[in-house]
Amino acid sequence: MKLLLVSPYHGGSHQAWAEGYGRASKLKVELLTLPARFWKWRIHGGAITLARRFNDADFKPDLILATDMLDLTTFLSLTRTTTHHIPVTLYMHENQLTYPLPDDKHTGPMRRQLGERDYHYAFINYASMLAADQVWFNSRYHLDSFFTALSNFLKHFPEYNELGSLKKLREKSEVMPIGIDLQRLDRGYIAENNSIKDPLQPLILWNQRWEYDKNPEAFFSALDILAYEGLPFRVAICGQQFGKQPHVFDEGFERLGDRMVHFGYADPNTYTRLLWASDITISTAHHEFFGISILEAIYAHTFPILPARLSYPELLPSEFHQDCLYQDFEDLLDRLRKALLNIRETRYIAAALAEHSAVYDWKYLSQRYDKNLTRLINQAHHEAYSSRSN
């Protein structure tokens, strides 16, 4: 069976997801992509360009799997001679309705004129979901928060607000976690496993995006307090960066001085080494729909200290919630102190938790994707056959 995977903003986690599934799937996967830049224009115009490329190609898929960055209604209308009978799954990596805006209206990738959200993009997400045969969200938190916000969004329209569509949308929506190539990290463990963790100076890792929604201010504030208290630790700062980043990173680098063992871009080998060398990873995020970088750290036996909200509780088995999830900033400080002062116990829990993170590897999730998509393909074929018979 043949699958067309449409990724209009093909970079970062979107690219890793698409190409990872393409490698792991037993289906024949063809990618249709555009570079990851000008995200607004990708949502506006990407469908037109990708529809033209699809029409010019000779690949006739049994199913289309598209990301939320595609204006699916436009794409399908421009390819209807071919796609009118092809089932479509829409994958919601994120959405433009509940993605948080920055406090500073002039900064961040979600800035809007006058600092207001542009609901046109949210409506494109909504219309694309209506056009899809099924919708996948990467976490339960993402699904629930989106539908809560969507109800309020539709109520603002003056008439024909289509609130009745919510029930049908929910019925065809489900949670399908992001697959990760975790096994690529095993090479770092094999090469380094006997000597990477310093018994006297535990290493704290930041491996998330350098952006406002990850709340780096709280992260550096916590480290400043514990450094002032004299607790032993080192720090590694890596993760995806963009042209403009919060000043708190450079300021934190200056304050932490000799504690900083890495700061900035980490190539794949360096990143793998840092994961396995780290003892603790912290999230202070205001926003997280899934948490790829956190799961990579957990897989590499790094102890997570995470907010007890957003998507994080879903990433951990319930028996680890008490150890790893915090309620507020003071709770974060208490848990970080305990982790640093009881490092042997911290490493023991991290090793136990690592075994559970393997379920997110493509080795396992690709089978779940294939089974679900194959069922949708077979259903479409059956309906088409029944229609011809009648």
Image: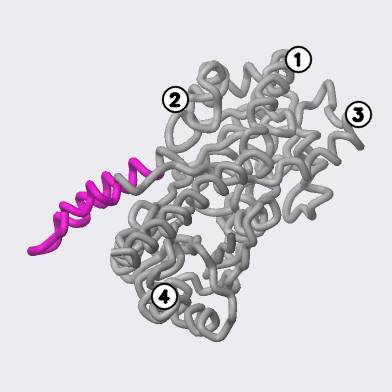
* Residue 292 badge: none
Residue occupying the point 33% across, 43% down: 145
Disc 1 to disc 3, C-alpha distance: 15 Å
Residue at the disc numbered 2: 327
Q: Amino acid at mark 4?
A: Phe
Residue at the disc numbered 3: 195
Q: Nearer the viewer, mark 2 or mark 4?
A: 4
**Above or below 260: residue 119:** below
- Report the front residue among 370 and 103: 370
Res 74 visible: yes
Residue 54 at what x, y percent from top left?
53, 79
Q: Going from the N terminus, do you reach mark 4 or mark 3 first?
A: 4
Disc 1 to disc 2, C-alpha distance: 24 Å
Identify the image quadrant of residue 175. top left
Residue occupying the point 82% across, 22% down: 200
Identify the image quadrant of residue 348. top right
Q: Amino acid at mark 2?
A: Gln
Quadrant of image for the N terminus: bottom right
Residue occupying the point 73% across, 54% down: 264
Quadrant of image for the C terminus: bottom left
